[in-house]
C-alpha cells in the first residue's frame, strides 16, 4: 500500500473512532418527566417522596413515631431546623437519613449535603446505598431525569464521568468513593449538587467544594447518622470527643 494512502486510512480510522467516542459521551436530549404530579407532590412532602419512590424500602405502615421523625426531617431540610432523635435499632433511621439526603439534593433545597456516620466504613456504605438509589431506581429516573438520567448513562463506571457531555458541554459529574457531584445541566435546580460522606472523626471540619468555574461551596445541610460505635459508647472520654466534634465542627 502506498505510504500516503496508508497514512490517510489511519487518519480516517482515528477520526471514526473519535466520532464514536464522542457520540457515546453525548447524553442529550434528556427524557421528559414521566409523572409531573407525582414529582410535585413528592417535592412538597418528604413522606410522599419516601412512599412514591421507595415503596420497597417503606412497605410497612408508618407508626406515630415515624411520622414525627419524618416531619422533623422535613423541617430540617426545608427550614434549617436542628434536632437530635434516638430511635431503636431496626426502626429505619439510617434509611430515612439516606433518603433525606437524596430528597434534599433532587429538590434543589441544598447544594451541598454532608452525610456523616460513626466511622469511615459506615460512611462509605451510606454513599454506596445512595449511589444505588440514584443509578438503579426506575421511578427516580422517570421523574428526575435532569439528575438521574446522566447518572444512568455512566453505568456505574466512574471513568465515564470525565468525558460525559450534554449538548457538547461537560456535565462535570463525579462518582467517587466519598463524594457524588450531580451533573451540571442548564436549568436543573440540582445542577452540580454535592453529597459527601465521612466518618465523624475524619475530615469533617472545613468541608469545601470548589466548582469547575471556581466557586467555593460549603455544606448547607449536615446529617449525622449513628455518631457512636458500640465501643465508643462505653467510654466517657470517647463520648465527649464525639460530642465536641458535633458541637464544634
Image (spheres, grey):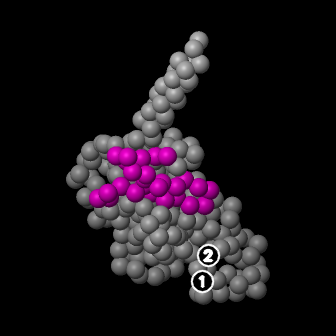
In the visual, does 73 lie left or right of 7?
A: left
Seen in the picture, residue 150 relative to 196 is either above or below; the reply is above
Please rate how many residues cluster around mark 2, counting C-alpha atoms within 10 Å: few if below 14, some from 14 to 19, many from 20.
Answer: some
- Residue drawn where x is 66% and y is 69% of the image: 199
Seen in the picture, residue 101 relative to 130 is either above or below; the reply is below
- Residue drawn where x is 70% and y is 87% of the image: 240
Seen in the picture, residue 2 relative to 163 is either above or below; the reply is above
Q: In x, y percent, where is residue 210?
A: 51, 70
Task: Provide the residue span drawn in magenta.
Answer: 163-188
- Residue drawn where x is 63% and y is 59% of the image: 124
The kind of secondary structure element at disc 1 is: loop
Query: Do the residues bearing badges 2 and 1 touch, measured as CB atoms within 8 Å?
Result: yes
Residue in front for this viewpoint, 82 or 105: 105
Residue wearing tag 2: 204
The mark found on residue 249 in the picture is 1
Residue in front for this viewpoint, 83 or 197: 197
Residue 72 in view of the camera: no
How would you classify the magenta stretch by its main secondary structure?
Answer: loop
Whether residue 178 appears in magenta in the rendering, the answer is: yes
Residue in front for this viewpoint, 22 or 153: 22
Whether residue 45 appears in magenta in the rendering, the answer is: no
Report the quarter where the N terminus lies: top right
First in sequence: mark 2 vs mark 1: 2
Q: In x, y percent, where is residue 101?
A: 46, 64
Amino acid at each position: 500500500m502506498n505510504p500516503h494512502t496508508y497514512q490517510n486510512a489511519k487518519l480516517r480510522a482515528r477520526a471514526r473512532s473519535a466520532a464514536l467516542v464522542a457520540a457515546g459521551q453525548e447524553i442529550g436530549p434528556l427524557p421528559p418527566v414521566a409523572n409531573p404530579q407525582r414529582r410535585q407532590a413528592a417535592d412538597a412532602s418528604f413522606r410522599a417522596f419516601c412512599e412514591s419512590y421507595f415503596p420497597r424500602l417503606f412497605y410497612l405502615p408508618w407508626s406515630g413515631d415515624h411520622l414525627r421523625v419524618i416531619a422533623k426531617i422535613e423541617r430540617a431540610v426545608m427550614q434549617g431546623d436542628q434536632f437530635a432523635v434516638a430511635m431503636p435499632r431496626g426502626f429505619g433511621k439510617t434509611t430515612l437519613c439516606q433518603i433525606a439526603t437524596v430528597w434534599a439534593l433532587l429538590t434543589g433545597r441544598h447544594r451541598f449535603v454532608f452525610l456523616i456516620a460513626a466511622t469511615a466504613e459506615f460512611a462509605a456504605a451510606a454513599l454506596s446505598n445512595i449511589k444505588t438509589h440514584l443509578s438503579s431506581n426506575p421511578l427516580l429516573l422517570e421523574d428526575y431525569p435532569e439528575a438521574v438520567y446522566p447518572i444512568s448513562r455512566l453505568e456505574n463506571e466512574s471513568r465515564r464521568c470525565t468525558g460525559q457531555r450534554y449538548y457538547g458541554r461537560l456535565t462535570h459529574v463525579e462518582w467517587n468513593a466519598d463524594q457524588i457531584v450531580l451533573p451540571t445541566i442548564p436549568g436543573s435546580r440540582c445542577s452540580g449538587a454535592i453529597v459527601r460522606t465521612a466518618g465523624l472523626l475524619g475530615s469533617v471540619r472545613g468541608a469545601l467544594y470548589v466548582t469547575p468555574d471556581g466557586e467555593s461551596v460549603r455544606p448547607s445541610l449536615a446529617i449525622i447518622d449513628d455518631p457512636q460505635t458500640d465501643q465508643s459508647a462505653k467510654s466517657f472520654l470517647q463520648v465527649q470527643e464525639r460530642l465536641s466534634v458535633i458541637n464544634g465542627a
